[in-house]
Amino acid sequence: MQVIRFIISNQQRILEYTLNHFSLVITVMLFSLVLWFLTGLLISRYQRIAEPVLSFSNILFCIPSISLYGLFMTLPQLGLGRRSAALALIMYAMMPLVRNVYRGVKSVDPWVIEAGRGMGMSWRQILLEIQIPLALPVVFAGIRVTVVLITGMATVATYIGERNLGRLIQHGIARSDYNMIITGAVIVSIIAVLLDYILGLLEKRLTPGRV
Amino acid sequence: MNVERFLVALIDRSPPHVLEHLQLVGVVLFFTVLIAFPLGVMLTRPRFRKYAGRVMFFLNAGQTIPPLAVISIFMPVFGLGFRPAAVALIIYSLLPIVRNTIAGILGVPEEVRQAARGMGMNQWELFYQVELPLSVPVIMAGLKTSSVLLVGTATLASLVGGGGMGRVIFAGIDMFWPEFILAGTLIVGAMAVVIDRGLTLLELFLIPRHLK
Amino acid sequence: MIQLIDVNKTFLNSPVPAVRGVSMEVKDGEICAMVGPSGCGKTTILRMINRLEEPSSGTIMVGGRDIQQEDPDRLRRGIGYVIQQIGLLPHRTIGENVSLVPRLLRWSEQKIKSRVINLLEMVGLDPGQVYEKFPHQLSGGQMQRVGVARALAADPPILLMDEPFGAVDPIVRNRLQEEFLNLQQQVKKTVCFVTHDINEAIKMGDRIAVLNEGRLVQYNSPLEVLSHPVNDFVVNILGEDRGVKLLNLTRAEALMSEAVLLQESQMDRAVQVLQESGKTVGFIKPNGNESIKYFTLENIKKGMPVKEILEKGTCFIDGFQPVKTALETMMKRNSDVVGILKEDRFVGIITWQDIKKHISTIREHENEC
Ligand SMILES: Nc1ncnc2c1ncn2[C@@H]1O[C@H](COP(=O)(O)OP(=O)(O)O)[C@@H](O)[C@H]1O
Ligand SMILES: [Mg+2]
């Protein structure tokens, strides 16, 4: 009840934080998808660089989120706020996305590719018509994990000046205001679940008739 | 980049927080395994299997709550300090282990299970001699994922007075000192690597020879 | 026509050549069955023909043109390719799978659709039932039929088949083999058919290429390979029951004693008539439903009586059927002779003695090697 009263009396602020949070997540996802999808394709084609790239992404993933935010923040080109936050989150998205694109492409039955080649499909056609469509379920799994992850991690960016739902939690901790913490947590979870759900629907549309 | 400040952070400020961090991670891992592993095993037993879906649903939903929120959620109950942070992190770390325990045990091929039953193993022998050894790799993978994530997330414990390497990193953020952030990060990274290696060794010890 | 001229292939990471100095020619409309133990280079040869592998040296000509001069993708679109694993695209319907190459060649939708329906019928599938299905909804045998249909889609003159029926159970395999042979009667493709099963090679091949350790050991008709294996390796591949296999390949008419028709009036000088005609068997035109009466030169010289072929209609086989069928008929009817028909007319007989003599000549060959 108190939570609802809190939300109603702080509508304006909460709306601003929510929109900021949402837009950060969307920006990060769009950049990450393009960047890490291409990286994943690249390393599945050039096997030699696959291992180092995947190891690098694993190491990145082990660094605490607050560290990446902090380090980027102190770079003069990035500074406090959106740019550092976005870049750090894009780096985090690398591991689940690149790994799943790579795994997805690699998991395509080599005999299907052999048959495609034998019928005279060019490597571009094989990539576009066989490898990418067949990798989609695994890629989607990666995207969904990433969205949930990024939505949660974005809250921490409040400590480098990003005005998003993390701020509710941050202030809630500072003032021991339980309602603020709950409000922030619940809205973040709703965004995560919603994005995951939408991606699930999209996945169903894009991957017909598979076992 | 100020080398002197970096060394201060590394040598002077960090050591006590390293201990706090390790203590936190150790306690959390201990209790997580103590809860998650039996829970996972129980959910694969015929009697409870029907609840597996529901429990997994709640754990998955729990995973969408941002770590920052999780860490602060027990503050009203336990106040500030080590305990709210530890309890929060335990809950946060449960999912990967429970999920992988269930996946590992249910992943044992049905024909192997049938053969074992056919040789006259009872439920317990089946679990202890067949299901458990064969699912060790998957369970250990879950434990590793969980531990590595935990080492990083535990930096947030300092926000609720739980101490740990977060103290050094947040000090760096507050002062705008990259040296402190970097020193803290390196130490946390090293811890993650050490724990990951340690668990890999443990795994080599536990995994049946033919699966290596 | 496919020609291989002194083709060699050594893989980069392998010390021993996979294919060594293979020269051979597959004539238009013929099935060449390549057979040999696992690892002898069959697949490699096949994959060099559609340039999935490049030979280390030597020339391969398809339709009189050096394939080295052609664009690999274009070349492959003109060559059907069937593999044991089939490799159907799991995310495409059967219709889409079969129409893959025509689409690559940019045929019109109209033409593609009717072609696909036509093809599915040709390989024994019901288009109405399978067209919209996905591969995982079909049985192994059905999938392999789709594989063949897909390879034939753009009507390529050449078909490469790598153990195409290797993954299905023996009963289905037999049916697929028969169906493919029937299909080949209509489409008359130039086929390279790889198998490790000598029986399949004998059954499917107009010619058999026996390979060992990358070398072409023998390249002949099945009859020739069976009756004149060039060395122990081929004898071994052919197996213990070579003689029986040969009986399967030899037409009954090849062993029969031809018969000549005698009028009643000629009966008293039958020996003379037979000798004049150069035949060893004579027979008398039956009245109505009577059995045919026949006699052999030998018997009549000894003054033995005219014999009747019992149970008219059951103790006859067609001349183009294999000797093995004659043998089976004899055993079933408990008779040591069967009559041979050609276009429903009695032309001669084949006896147990004839078959025994035939087997013993094969034995002699065998001992020679
Ligand atoms: N891509 C490759 N790289 C290295 N060696 C290969 C490759 N493909 C085949 N080989 C080798 O070449 C030989 C012939 O192989 P293959 O043509 O597949 O035999 P078959 O089809 O008759 O079983 C084998 O010894 C095999 O190990
Ligand atoms: Mg092969």
Image (cartoon, rainbow, N blue to C red):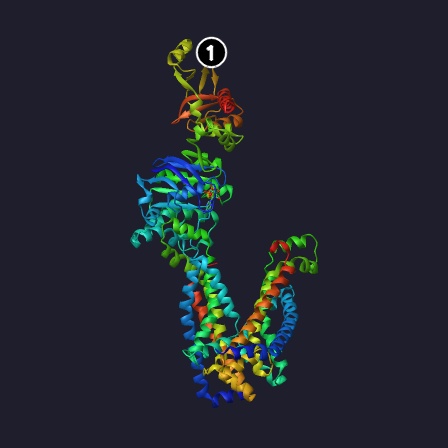
Residue A43 drawn at (x, y percent): 44, 60
Total count of labels: 1
In the displayed orientation, state which residue is furthest to the front.
Answer: B4
In the displayed orientation, state which residue is furthest to the bottom.
Answer: A9
Left or right of residue C58, residue A183 in this image: right
Residue A58 vs residue C190, the one in the foreground = A58
Judge: label 1 CB < 8 Å from ligand 1. Answer: no
Q: Is the residue B166 above or below the residue C56 in the image?
A: below
Asked if one can make out residue A208 in the rendered structure from this viewpoint, the answer is no
Q: Is the residue B47 above or below the residue A24 in the image?
A: above
Residue C88 vs residue A44, the one in the foreground = A44
**Quarter occupied by the N terminus of chain C:** top left
Instruction: List the residue tagged with mark 1.
Output: C300
Q: Is the residue C177 above or below the residue B110 in the image?
A: above
Q: Is the residue A209 above or below the residue C294 in the image?
A: below
Residue C335 vs residue C113, the one in the foreground = C113
Q: Residues within 10 Å of mark 1 (few under 14, many from 20)?
A: some
Residue C231 drawn at (x, y percent): 48, 28
Residue C307 drawn at (x, y percent): 48, 17
Residue B168 drawn at (x, y percent): 55, 80
Which amino acid lies under the numbered mark 1 shown in the image of this protein?
A: Ile
Asked if one can make out residue A120 in the rendered structure from this viewpoint, the answer is yes
Name the residue rendered at 46%, 11% in the picture: C300
Mark 1 lies on a secondary structure that is helix
Q: The numbered mark 1 sits on a residue in which chain?
A: C
